[in-house]
Image (cartoon, grey):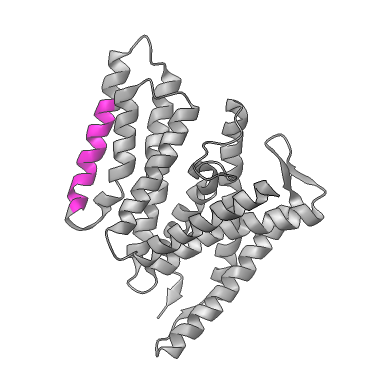
Amino acid sequence: MLAMTTRLISAAVGIVITLVVLLLHNTIVFPIAVGIISLIMLMEFYKVNRLFKYRAATGAGMLFALLYPICLLGSASRFKMLLMVLCIIAVCGEYIFRKTAMYMRSFFAVVTGMFVIPFSLSTAVYLNNAHEQHGIIYVLLALAGAWIADSGAYFVGSAFGKHKLCPEVSPKKSIEGFVGGIVSDIVFFALFNVIYAGVASSKGMTVSFSWVSTILVAICCAVLGTVGDLSASVLKRQLEIKDYGNIMPGHGGLLDRFDSVLLVMPFLYAYISAFGFYTV
């Protein structure tokens, strides 16, 4: 009972912080928040992989994670390539300097974390700027696309789960839960789009959407969220750890909560860039 209470309180605090950041999406607070989240996630990744002994390399990675989202806005965008090059030089410099102490696995772990996490989360900034009206809606859909499916999979799997989805990686995940997560996303996306179009209409605006696109995106978000979650679980299994951190009591670290977002958010941005989603 105490554990569940802790999880609920921690989740409530996280939701409040997320809502505040989303409300301030048109201010510098948004990219700064994305940068801070990227930084914390990268620190968790470096810690469990025991990489902090390489101070220059991990320091460069953390600096990149913090500043890159901010460098996507306005006049700061001219510095993003310079930031990237300088940070890569710092990582390579330590690799050369520690030629007998920093092995190839550590080098590529530093570089992989340095780019995958910030680049993935920074698509939130791209999504936010993708459309004056729909931008923040896209961000919300990306987060919901990962987390709604995860919650739906948990509840359906707990009630009806009998067939294991990937027992060697995540024993609690079931095929029934996986399907429940997909259905949850479809229902959420459908209801959200209907309500969003209705609200827009009440304000004198016309927002149209395709049912095929809505269902397709919902399914892809649910599937990719599961893939991201399972990928993070594989790493935890290999490292023999339960959670990446403890910043969210009862939930683990930010990387534990955002692992399912790491593929969903870039996918949604790529899909919207290629095909669009709403028409006005």
* Left or right of 263, for residue 104: left
Residue at 45%, 88% (x, y): give it.
201
Tell me where the magenta segment starts and ends, as one range.
76-90
Within the image, what quadrant is residue 106 found in? top left
Picture quarter with the C terminus:
bottom left
For residue 176, say whether it is visible: no
Nearer to the camera, 31 or 194: 31
Question: Where does the image place residue 193, in percent across and percent down from the top left?
Answer: 53, 76
Within the image, what quadrant is residue 218 found in? bottom right
* Left or right of 215, for residue 269: left
Nearer to the camera, 27 or 217: 27
Question: Where does the image place residue 82, in percent across and percent down from the top left?
Answer: 20, 40
Nearer to the camera, 13 or 40: 13
Q: Is residue 6 above or below residue 89?
A: below
Task: Let me know if residue 21 is in the magenta part.
Answer: no
Q: Main secondary structure of the magenta part?
A: helix
Residue at 67%, 48% (x, y): give it.
2
Question: Where does the image place residue 1, in percent across and percent down from the top left?
Answer: 71, 50
Nearer to the camera, 241 or 127: 241
Q: Is residue 33 above or below residue 56?
A: below
Task: Let me know if residue 86 is in the magenta part.
Answer: yes
